[in-house]
Image: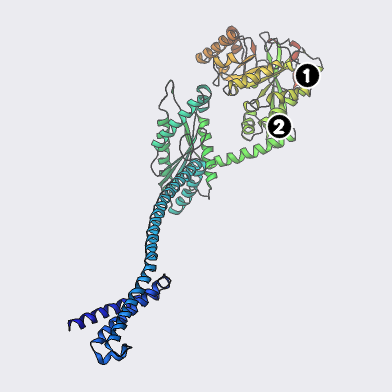
């Protein structure tokens, strides 16, 4: 009985194995394996032999499977079936096993490759992440550079425009007032020129740090360039008056902070500032550019009043701006229509003998009447017309002067002085311009004196010196005008080929009553004498002034005491030139080169 149980169990196991193999054979990859069909046949034969073995126990079932009639034939079938089954199995596995081994090996290799590839991908991923981070940092750096000033790291004009536009619409939407504070340093140019650009940069950095400390976190501070900074005070108050007071307090705090001395390695400097304020939103819709322009106007207004001044923009300033723009346009028209003309004011020596004249520009406006140079010269400067105006004056002066000298009315060495604006003098081709203009007239170069202000000599001293030397070699005299009001120092004067200093009229006016003015004039005279430079006192209107100057060694004068400015023919009619003498001032024995 146990035999039957064992045989049936074996048959069932064989059947299951055969079933599994047959199911596996449905899969193309298994079916394609070499020897797989032989294994199926082998198992089939073994299963068949086992069935024969089982039917042996039930002779009545023999006819189902056993081919032969006898027991020996059945035994033979069983043996043959088993042997054939084992043979096919052996043959099948012999072919299949290497394939399985190869498959296993391939799988191992594949797994290895997958691991390696995964590792490579992970490393590539890390590299990519690093590259992405670096690129992000580079982009952020570029963005920072595009929106920030490299010197102070403060936001620049672009960033400020973006912020201000946003703040304008926010203030309008939420009904509160904000303020733009436009400020620049009062003496930055002289710091830069005298102490050098390195010191100037250090000062700007310190100023930026101090301004940063003066602002709230929600406020915006930017540098527009040079020594110009803008502070936007956000969300001050819904009440205009309170907002203005808060802006005023903030501005005063800035002025106080910047009034503190700046200690550098070998310098102690003070960099005070003026501030122009514009509150917004206003009654009309305003763009960012309008606000900045108005705050800038307020700043100019503050600067007109002196150092450390705060000024608000008010509507009259807008009218003033429009008036200035109109005047600039009219100056242009005036030049085209030759509305400008010249008056000449004699310059005299101690014996009241004329040795030269200063050409002074006048403008007879068709509707406004006489417009003074104090009014139109600054506007011509602002509008960029000063160079054109300068050339106009040179041409007209030289034309009139050459004709005047040709008439032999007076001493032929009499000089004519022409005022030159600093920006015109600083043009790179200024010397060539002068040469070109002189070549148009029958006049020796030595008849011309150029009067420049101190604003010129605090610029690039080396360049100015070269330019002045070139002019002097042409025989042109050089006179430093309005002396005492600027930043000139003895060191500058020593380096420049100057012929004359003109003491500013503001010192002469009260010279006999204000001891300070008298002391300054005495110092100027002493200094000029030691440098071998002649001095002309401007604005001499009374005999008391003249006597005072004469007592201190000043022997050349110009002013109403001797003659008011007038057209040349009028001066001739008055006999002004009858006492003319050869020039003593501006007489430096330089011979014209041509
Ligand atoms: Mg002058």
Query: Label for residue 336?
Result: none
Is the C terminus in the top left, top right, bottom left or bottom right quadrant?
top right
Farthest residue, direction left? 1
- Is 413 displayed left or right of 200 in the figure? right
Q: Which residue is mark 1?
A: 443
In percent of width and height, residue 127 lies at 43, 48
- Given residues 141 and 436, the one toward you in this image is 141
Residue at screen point 71% across, 28% down = 391
Farthest residue, direction right? 407
Q: Which element carries disc 2, helix, strand or loop?
A: strand
Above or below 508: residue 276: below
- Is 103 displayed left or right of 557 in the figure? left
Q: Does residue 113 show up?
A: yes
Labels 1 and 2: the sequence-earlier one: 2
Q: Which residue is mark 2?
A: 364
In percent of width and height, residue 303 lies at 51, 31
Above or below 564: residue 185: below
- Given residues 325 and 229, the one toward you in this image is 229
Quarter of the figure with residue 506: top right
In percent of width and height, residue 102 lies at 39, 62
Colour setting: rainbow
Quarter of the figure with residue 558: top right
Q: Residues within 10 Å of mark 1 (few under 14, many from 20)?
A: some
Q: Indicate if the residue with disc 2 has its beta carbon within 8 Å of ligand 1.
A: no
Q: Residues within 10 Å of mark 2 (few under 14, many from 20)?
A: some
In percent of width and height, residue 76 lies at 30, 83
- Given residues 408 and 575, the one toward you in this image is 408
Q: Which element carries disc 1, helix, strand or loop?
A: loop
For ligand 1, give the image quadrant: top right
- Is 298 displayed left or right of 562 in the figure? left
Q: Does residue 272 show up?
A: no
In this rendering, which labeled residue sits more in front, label 1 or label 2?
A: 1
């Amino acid at each position: 009985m146990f035999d039957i149980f064992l045989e049936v169990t074996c048959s069932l196991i064989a059947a299951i194995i055969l079933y599994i193999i047959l199911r596996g054979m449905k899969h193309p990859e298994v079916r394609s394996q070499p020897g797989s069909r032989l294994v199926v046949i082998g198992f089939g034969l073994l299963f068949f032999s086992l069935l024969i073995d089982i039917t042996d126990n039930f002779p009545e079932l023999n006819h189902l499977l056993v081919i032969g009639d006898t027991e020996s034939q059945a035994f033979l079938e069983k043996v043959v079936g088993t042997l054939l089954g084992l043979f096919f199995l052996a043959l099948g596995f012999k072919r299949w096993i290497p394939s399985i081994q190869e498959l296993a090996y391939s799988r191992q290799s594949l797994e290895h490759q997958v691991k390696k590839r995964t590792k490579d991908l992970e490393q590539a991923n890390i590299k990519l992440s690093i590259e992405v981070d670096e690129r992000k940092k580079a982009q952020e750096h570029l963005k920072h550079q595009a929106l920030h000033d490299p010197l102070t790291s403060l936001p620049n004009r672009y960033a400020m425009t973006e912020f201000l536009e946003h703040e304008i619409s926010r203030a309008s939407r939420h009904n509160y007032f904000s303020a733009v504070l436009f400020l620049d340093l009062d003496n930055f140019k002289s710091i830069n020129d005298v102490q050098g650009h390195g010191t100037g940069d250090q000062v700007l950095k310190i100023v930026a740090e101090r301004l940063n400390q003066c602002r709230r976190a929600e406020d915006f501070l930017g540098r527009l360039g040079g020594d110009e900074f803008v502070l936007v005070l956000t969300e001050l108050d819904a009440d205009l008056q309170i907002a203005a007071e808060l802006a005023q307090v903030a501005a005063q705090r800035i002025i106080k902070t910047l009034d503190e001395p700046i200690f550098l390695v070998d310098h102690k400097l003070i960099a005070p500032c003026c501030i122009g304020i514009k509150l917004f939103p206003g009654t009309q819709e305003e763009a960012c550019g309008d606000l900045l322009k108005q705050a800038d106007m307020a700043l100019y207004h503050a600067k007109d009043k002196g150092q450390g001044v705060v000024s608000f923009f008010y509507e009259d300033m807008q009218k003033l701006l429009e008036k200035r723009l109109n005047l600039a346009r009219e100056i242009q028209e005036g030049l085209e229509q030759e509305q400008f003309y010249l008056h000449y004011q004699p310059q005299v020596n101690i014996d009241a003998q004329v040795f030269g004249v200063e050409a002074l520009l006048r403008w007879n406006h068709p509707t406004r009447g006489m417009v003074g140079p104090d009014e139109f010269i600054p506007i011509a400067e602002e509008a960029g017309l000063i160079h054109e105006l300068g050339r106009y004056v040179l041409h007209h002066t030289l034309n009139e002067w050459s004709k005047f000298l040709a008439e032999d009315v007076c001493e032929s060495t009499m000089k004519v002085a022409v005022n030159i604006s600093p920006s015109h003098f600083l043009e790179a081709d200024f010397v060539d311009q002068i040469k070109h203009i002189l070549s148009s007239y029958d006049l020796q170069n030595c008849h011309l004196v150029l009067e420049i202000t101190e604003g010129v000599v605090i610029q690039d001293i080396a360049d100015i010196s070269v330019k002045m030397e070139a002019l002097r070699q042409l025989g042109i005299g050089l006179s430093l005008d309005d002396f005492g009001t600027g930043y000139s120092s003895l060191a500058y004067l020593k380096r420049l080929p100057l012929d004359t200093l003109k003491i500013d009229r503001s010192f002469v006016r009260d010279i006999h009553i204000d001891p300070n003015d008298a002391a300054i004039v005495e110092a100027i005279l002493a200094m000029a004498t030691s440098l071998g430079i002649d001095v002309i006192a401007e604005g001499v209107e009374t005999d008391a002034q003249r006597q005072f100057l004469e007592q201190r060694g000043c022997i050349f004068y110009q002013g109403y005491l001797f003659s008011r400015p007038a057209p040349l023919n009028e001066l001739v009619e008055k006999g002004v030139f009858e006492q003319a003498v050869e020039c003593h001032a501006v007489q430096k024995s330089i011979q014209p080169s041509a």
